[in-house]
Image: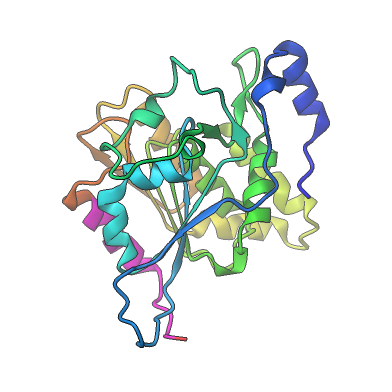
Amino acid sequence: MLMLRSSALLLATLHNPHLATFLTFRSTRLFMTLKNQNQKSGSTPKKKPRILCLHGKFQNAAIFSNKIAGARRKLQREYELQFLDGPIVLPQEQDGDNGEAAGNESSTGECTDDENTPRSWWLRSPDEKSHILVREALEYVISQSDTHQIDAILGFSQGGTLATALALSGAFPNLRCVVTAGAPFVAEAFQEAALLTKECGQAHSDSLFDLGLRIPKFHMAGETDALVAVESTRQLCENGGNGTFVMHDQGHLFPTRSLRVQEVLDFLSKHIDRISPS
């Protein structure tokens, strides 16, 4: 069972007693696994490369899947997609930063109340000067994932920052590449990823972190993004290692227009070796 570092949680709740009423870390697997539904009956299924998909703050697995439906349908033709729910449950009523939930196209499917529950991977500290529960977020995703079976990680906003940090942590030995959109640079995510390689008892933790820096990464930023500055995503690209930076003419969203989706598909195809049929 995933254990929280009590000091970080205690500090947060002492400064903000309301935090305890909505902060919930989930230790159960919460995956939406999406495969191509066009497989003909009786035919031998082809084992597809697997992509872990991480949503933004104030979203969840179902919301993110619905909002990128245009891109998702094309990705599903070649890849198995796994959408993971963030561990922190947030209040339904949020007025400020929930632009992440509003990003992208309208949902193409109806969501239940549970599927509409906003979530997060980590939080801001009570004084808004740092981020807390970042290490727990890394450990949570690692514990809930079949790390040896993940070929790529795709993340939006906070989920994109997390995807980059996970690549640096060395916890996904077969990871070939990372794709992010509207993701900010968060220093604590890089710090915790570096610490994770050392605290896990890796004999060559420095070289493991360096290997993570060499994993190809594709970072997209929105020219009119009002939530995450373009320069913050550029900083993520520069610090994350082996990054390709692309700017589109939209706002805070994961691009679903054909041109941008094709760029993502080309990047994935270039870096993920096709797996032979099982």
Q: Position of residue 272 (x, y in %)?
A: 40, 69
Q: Nearer the viewer, residue 156 or 236?
A: 156
Residue shown at the point (54%, 43%) measured from the top left: 162
Residue shown at the point (60%, 38%) measured from the top left: 189
Q: With 150 as the anchor, is 231 left or right in this view?
A: left
Disc tally is: 0
What kind of secondary structure does the magenta stretch mostly adopt? helix
Q: Is residue 123 visible?
A: yes
Q: Position of residue 17 (x, y in %)?
A: 73, 13
Q: Position of residue 174 (x, y in %)?
A: 55, 68
- On screen, residue 206 above or below 248: below
Residue shown at the point (69%, 21%) measured from the top left: 21
Its colouring scheme is rainbow
Q: Position of residue 72 (x, y in %)?
A: 32, 54
- On screen, residue 219 above or below 31: above
- On screen, residue 146 above or below 193: below
Which quadrant of the view contains residue 219? top left
Is residue 263 found inside the magenta-colored segment of the image? Answer: yes
- On screen, residue 3 above or below 90: below
The residue stretch that appears in magenta:
261-277
Which quadrant of the view contains residue 184? top left
Q: Nearer the viewer, residue 157 or 129?
A: 157
Q: With 81 as the anchor, is 270 left or right in this view?
A: left
Q: With 274 as the anchor, is 30 left or right in this view?
A: right
Q: Is residue 228 visible?
A: no
